[in-house]
Image (cartoon, rainbow, N blue to C red):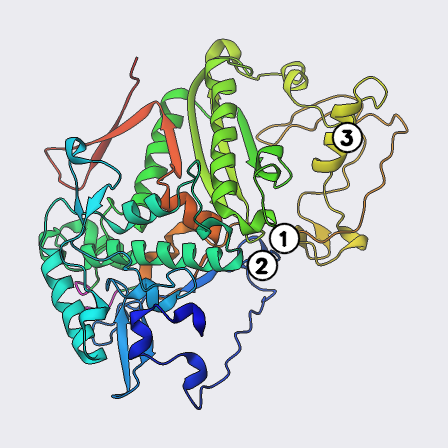
Amino acid sequence: MCILSNNSYARFFKGLRDVPNLDDLNIVLSCYPSLDKRVYNLPSASQVAAIWTESDDQSSDGRAHIQVYSRSVGSHRIQHYYGCYDPLQYPLLFPRGECGWHHGIKRLSKRKRGGDTCEDDINIDPASVNSSSELIDLEQRAADRGKTEEGTVSAREYYCYRFQIRDGDESMLLHTLRLLQQFSVDAYVKIETCRLDFHRHRQNKIRSEILEGILDSVSVGQTAASKVGRKVILPASFIGGPRDMRRRYLDAMALVQKYGKSDIFLTMTCNPAWKEIQENLKYHEKPQDRPDLLARVFRAKFEMLKAEILNKQIFGEVAACVYVIEFQKRGFPHAHLLLILKPGHKLLNPESYDKIVCAELPDKDQYPHLYSLVVKHMIHGPCGAMDKSCPCMRDGACKNHYPKSFCPQTTHGEDTYPYYRRRDDGKKVKVSFKIISCGSADDIDEIKDFQKGRWVSPPEAFWRIYEFRLNEMNPAVYTLQNESQSTTSEMLVQRFS
């Protein structure tokens, strides 16, 4: 191909069309009725995603890699940390064989920065290499040397730099449609693999012999003596790991213990029709073709929502706030917030509920814009007889008990959700039949045994690459070690002014 005429790798590596007897494989995604449809539903978005698996079997090489075929001596494995990984996997994005991320890229100090932000003195130039075997050998030696370097650019920093929107930038990287989706997911899997490798190779520095380790083994069914003690420990410092998730849950319970139960549960979902997204689409792009825009715009609007709640206090003064960012198989991020209000602002009776929650259609003539938004975004379903396959259906009925019965006034029972006012005023709205699948790909702690498949979508990849926060608690919660027993923790809540 003429596009690869200036690509040095094309001298000794074959293209796929030159490789005979390649098997055609199909991946079939099945949805089992016995599983939670909110989690294990089938994807409905037109996007590229990765089903990522990791093995805890130390005898097998489960590291991320690609297989390439040389023109002379068979095939080679290109590890994810080789500088030639990106140009070989994505020749359309690196047509001249430019080097991708690898260990050892040095970070420049601020006073030395000019047009470039890093320097690379261990880059392997394929033009100076005589064979594929020599290239692989040089890449491995460069990787081994680069891992020992200090002050180097991490994989996340490298790809975060590559995925920036810049004025006057003529790069087409962010406009390559589905190829961008694949590249971003691949980059994030590479980043996460590097982090997991870091923890895997420092097991001797983790104090896994404490009682907590035994309790962990029992909790997951590893009661056999031959299994206890062989578990690979993933410390709480790994974001999204089992200990991190357990710690955050306990932190949230500490807030509840101090400030009381939550008053408001609020959900915000990314809308691909937002003008900030639509106005920045080019070259006939669709929202799913720009997952970087989805992540950036959603974060900006979510920060605005937080400012309305915490600074402008639209619901009253907030004593504590907890939120988490999740990603749906429809491809868009969404946030769940729990708010605990201060005593003088708590919702204690139906009258206070009616001030912030309305389960009725707005007056179409008096509030036409609000009416259109509610009809477009806030109508449940359809489910029941109209769509028995809707994710909310359980045993032939809606688990959320829709359609709701009319209720002349808001009431609340003992330890139940409020029954919001739904007066029979004769208003109706036409609901179109459209199947929508909601839910996160899986709980983040599915990584706990390194065996369960994980669904990674492009918006999540960009969210993690840009290092946006996945969750937050306000006020902060600290865990202090009890001197009398090393595995017992006391939760202290402290607010910073």
The residue wearing badge 3 is 372
Label 2 sits on residue: 43
Which quadrant of the figure contains the C terminus?
Answer: top left
Position in image of residue 240 (x %, y %) = 34, 47
In the image, what residue type sits under mark 3? Ser
Q: Does the residue at mark 2 contact the one at mark 3 (Cβ under 8 Å)?
A: no
Depth check, front residue: 117 or 397: 117
Q: Quadrant of residue 115?
A: top left
Cα–Cα gap, marks 3 and 1: 23 Å
> The disc labelled 1 sits on which kind of residue?
Ser
Contact, CB < 8 Å: mark 3 with mark 1?
A: no
**Where 404 sits versus 478, above or below?**
below
Task: Quote the CA–CA distance across marks 2 and 1.
Answer: 7 Å
**Whether residue 243 can be seen here:** no
For the N terminus, the quadrant is: bottom left
Q: CA distance from mark 2 to mark 3?
A: 28 Å
Q: In the picture provided, is 413 more to the left or to the right than 162? A: right
At mark 1, the secondary structure is: loop
- N-terminal of the pair, mark 2 or mark 3, is 2
